[in-house]
Image (cartoon, rainbow, N blue to C red):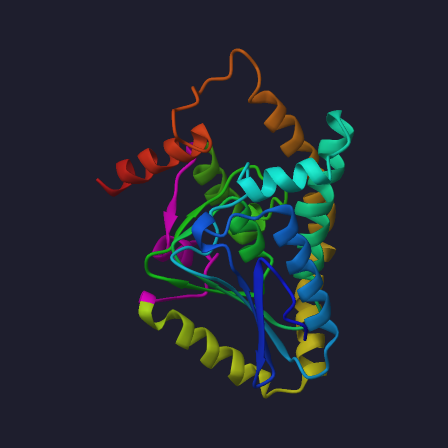
Amino acid sequence: MSSDYQFIDVEVRNKVAYLTLNRPKQRNAQSRRLLEELDAAFAVAGSDRDVHVIVLLGAGEHFSAGHDLGSMEEQADRAERPLQKGLRGRFDHSRENFVEKTLRWRNVPKPTIAGVQGYCIFAGWMIASAMDIIYAADNAMLLASNFQYFSVPWDMPPRQAKELLYESRFIDAQEAQSLGLVNRVFPLDELNEAVVEYAERIAENDPFQLRMIKSAVNQVQDTQGFAAQISAAHLMHIVSSEGEKDPDYALKVPKGARRPMVERAFENYERRRR
């Protein structure tokens, strides 16, 4: 596999492809170019016969703090490749980068594993939930919303999803495991070793059998309408995000915070701990 990427690292060893988000200074915020590189790497790994398993990691302290909403690199890219103006441009950009790509990663014909540490916010949750298995460090903090690839009602029981989303609250790794989003939780310094050990263990199995097992399990969700729900929920996300611009939007944008809901989610997490 090629390693000619700027925003991700790719390494293959022992039949496992390791794709690592590599923007640690930006907490692995997902720029358009990072997502394009990640999409290309998943496609290559998915078709490489020497790769039996794909692992997704984040460099540095955090798995991913979500969408890149305006780093210097992202602003330069937007200036170089501007979106079509208006709702049409927003929809096309959102649909391709945050729905179509994520669905492709969910459906790559090989087992996929995410190793999550630190922040896993919004788009971080999205790409982690598209993986077959999630191992988390004990310092992981996860935050969901009505985001573009709305997998939350599939990640946990619907009533639990509603309770969490209505409140808007971070969950830690232990709660994520109890809800069924995370498979296992490890001390931070043991996470990578645990991911590698599991990945290499299943990589020794027959790749065609692994593919059929994944297809059979995914088909359960697909028969229940997974893709149709993701597509419909994306439209609700677009409407919801437009609603944040309304003059009577309930939350005030705090200074220095990415979005008001993130600050509110930290507050609600601390209230829950008391």
Q: Is residue 182 magenta?
A: yes
Q: Is residue 110 magenta?
A: no
Q: Residue at x 66, y 71 (%)?
A: 214
* Residue range (magenta): 167-188
Question: Looking at the picture, how far across and down is residue 222, in whole percent?
Answer: 72, 56
Q: Residue at x 60, y 27 (%)?
A: 240
Residue occupying the far left of the picture: 274
Question: Looking at the picture, how far across and down is residue 63, in whole percent?
Answer: 46, 56
Q: Is residue 225 visible?
A: no
183 up-or-down from 81: above or below:
below
- Between 214 and 90, the one lying in front of the other is 90
Question: Looking at the picture, how far across and down is residue 69, in whole percent?
Answer: 55, 37
Residue occupying the far top of the picture: 247
Q: Residue at x 77, y 31 (%)?
A: 84
188 up-or-down from 254: above or below:
below
Q: Is residue 231 left or right of residue 186?
A: right
Which image quarter: residue 39? bottom right
Q: Is residue 162 left or right of residue 75?
A: left
Q: Residue at x 73, y 40 (%)?
A: 81
Quadrant where the C terminus lies? top left
Quadrant where the N terminus lies? bottom right
Q: Is residue 144 visible?
A: yes
Count of numbered marks: 0
103 up-or-down from 214: above or below:
above
